[in-house]
Amino acid sequence: MAGATLSPTLRGMLWMAASGILFTLLNSTMKKLSHELDPWLVGFLRYLLGALVILVPALRLGVRELWPKAPGLQLVRGLFHAGGLLLWFAALPMVSIAELTAIGFSGPIFICLGAVLFLKERMTGARWAAVLVGFAGVLLVVHPVDAGGYSGISTGMLLMLASGPVFAGSFLVAKVLTRHDRTDIMVLWQHLLVSLLVLPFALAAWTMPSAGQWILLIVCGFLGAGGHYCITRSFRVADISAVQSVKFLELVWAALLGLAMFDSAPEGWTLAGGVLILASTLWLARHESRPA
């Protein structure tokens, strides 16, 4: 009953926050696996196992219901997402962690621009302010100019920056798909298509995972499918532009995870940026909850 009293935007923000927690756990697990296995293999198995995770409950609908009502859009989304992964993995060896984080979190800005241009969403000043202040919080956390020695624009930075609008295209298509398909069907086909498209890269560096690695990969399948399910539910109930500032909370979740698991206290930059991100998110939530 409590959830029914929340505005659609607030419900969308809560779904997005839940996805951030799941993706923070996913990224930590995948980072460990990527030190032991080829990253493309890890990415392929994460999406393939995620497809199996979502397929089991989806089968209760019947085999006929598994086919999407907008297969063309599903394919377009799969191509966008796989293309973003291709650029992201290509850039990975060429950029520092600080640059990776800062540029990677430019995604919400591209999504908000796309929502205005292609989905005709009403991008209010409050939403722009929350996204830009949240991104400023990210820059405070990673301070890429002096962390690791900023040395100008590199090929890796350009590739990473290019992945932002490509991933944004995937999420914008997902918003359109919520008008046609169920959430679980959308997540299922996203995982199936991405795993199929990245399969050639995985086969080129195939190594059989150990039993312990298979367990972690299965965990990744659950976390990834759950995270994308939450994101899709968020897009279904709210404007995609209204929930983007919540994406920056992933830095806060990552800091809390480090504190809980490794007793690693956040630095001053992290605390300052986290406070700014949290403040902008709470302010937007309060603003969006007011009657029109």
Image: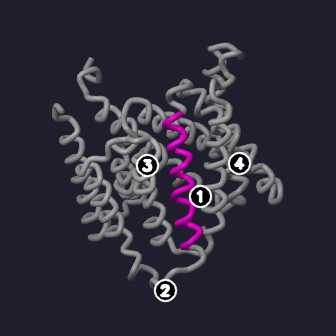
Q: How far apart are marks 3 and 2 (CA)?
A: 34 Å
Q: Do the residues labelled 3 and 2 touch (CB within 8 Å)?
A: no
Question: Which residue corresponds to mark 4?
Answer: 44
Under mark 3, the amino acid is: Leu
Front tag of 2 and 1: 2
Quarter of the image containing the N terminus?
top left
Question: Which residue corresponds to mark 3?
Answer: 117
Query: Of label 3 and label 4, which has the lower sequence position?
Result: 4
Q: Which residue is drawn at 18% across and 33% down?
A: 292
- 10 Å neighbourhood of mark 3: few (<14), some, or many (≥20)? few
Find numbered disc 3 in the image and state the secondary structure of the residue it sits on: helix
| Magenta segment main secondary structure | helix
Quarter holding residue 50: top right
Question: Which residue corresponds to mark 1?
Answer: 32
Query: Of label 1 and label 3, which has the lower sequence position?
Result: 1
Q: Distance between the residues labelled 4 and 2?
A: 33 Å
Under mark 1, the amino acid is: Lys
Find numbered disc 1 in the image and state the secondary structure of the residue it sits on: helix
Which residues lie in the magenta part? 157-176
Question: Which residue corresponds to mark 2?
Answer: 151
